[in-house]
Amino acid sequence: MTIRLATRASRLALWQTEHVAALLQAAGFETEIVPMQTTGDAVQDRSLAKIGSKGVFTEELENSLLRGETHLAVHSAKDVQSSIPRELELLAFLEREQVNDVVLSFNEQFSLDKPGIVLGTSSTRRKAQLRRFYPHAETAEARGNLQTRLRKLEEGQFDALVLAYAGVHRMGYEHLVRHTLPATQFVPATGQGSIAVECAADLDADLKARLKAALDHPATHTCLLAERAFLHTMEGGCSIPSFALATLDGGRLRLHGGLISLSGEEYVEEIQTAEPAEAIALGVSVADSVLGRGGREILASIREHRG
Ligand SMILES: NCc1[nH]cc(CCC(=O)O)c1CC(=O)O
């Protein structure tokens, strides 16, 4: 049978969807890729924090699932909002790529320690983390897909660009990586580095099980359940500078989550561990602790700042 795959039309999204298609073909399915434009692709002149983070890269794909036009939607897990419509289901998470943020520059001598450097990023989390850990660096807006951002870098709109290694690797830009930011400071956004596959909740149960068996990476799935429960409890989409990284270590699940003020001054982080079967409870617990130890005040000041 032919599985129809909904995807954004960006090069990274198509790479990811071709990867999903290859796994499905190896399991005996035929595939058809159905690219579509999302609000996030269409609106390039405003930061995501301003257009509102709710599903700007996912809504059109989800609508095609709801209309029954496609069987699966392929997303960057990071772009999937923390709660999805009840008619839909996150079926599988593909094995996670290295999670770090990296710094790209055409200048081989580029150094993060140089005063006055300008770093391109459009993420509120990365801006806040840079203010905290590299206060001498300035940031500049860098919206657009990876190719657009690299063009801005080439044009000299900033000295370097901060991106997720996952996308950089998938697009073959590793030769421009000058620095790998430590995941202990630049804790990534929920889901960074993994590909999420979504379907309609009422898709045939047997087909669902076969698709999941072909695509899902159980360890990554467990980590993503914890991170997404954290994000959900945090009540924030990708426009809130929260971060969460779960790892499985010797059979134990560890979650590092937190929240940072836009200035980088206020910082609340928490690390807890649990049995993998308790992934969701772990996410809720880490978020509750962060909210209770000052996170609520940080969220309130961010809301006030936005007006
Ligand atoms: N928000 C955009 C986005 N969504 C997923 C990735 C990279 C791939 C990934 O993290 O899986 C990116 C670009 C970036 O953050 O540099």
Image (tube, grey):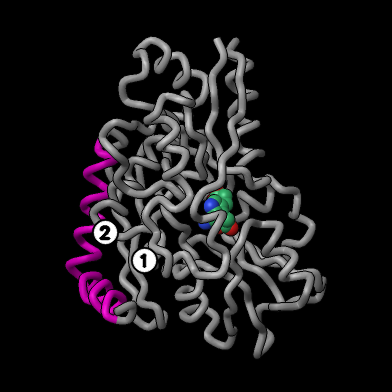
Q: Dot 1 surroundings within 10 Å: few (below 14), some, or many (20 or more)?
A: many
Label 2, on which residue? 234
- Image quadrant holding the N terminus, namely top right
Which of the image's four quarters has the C terminus? bottom left
Task: Count how many numbered circles sit on residues in the image.
Answer: 2
Name the N-terminal-most of marks 1 and 2. 2
- What residue sits right under mark 1 in the picture? 240
State if disc 2 and disc 1 touch (CB < 8 Å).
yes
Magenta part of the protein: which range?
278-304
Q: CA distance from mark 1 to mark 2?
A: 9 Å
Residue type at mark 2: give it. Met
Give the x, y percent position of residue 207.
Answer: 42, 13
Check if residue 236 falls in the magenta segment: no
Q: Nearer the viewer, residue 147 or 175?
A: 147
* Residue drawn at 38 percent across, 62 percent down: 52
Which residue shows up at 57% across the image and 14% down it?
Answer: 2
Q: Which quadrant of the figure has residue 42?
A: bottom right
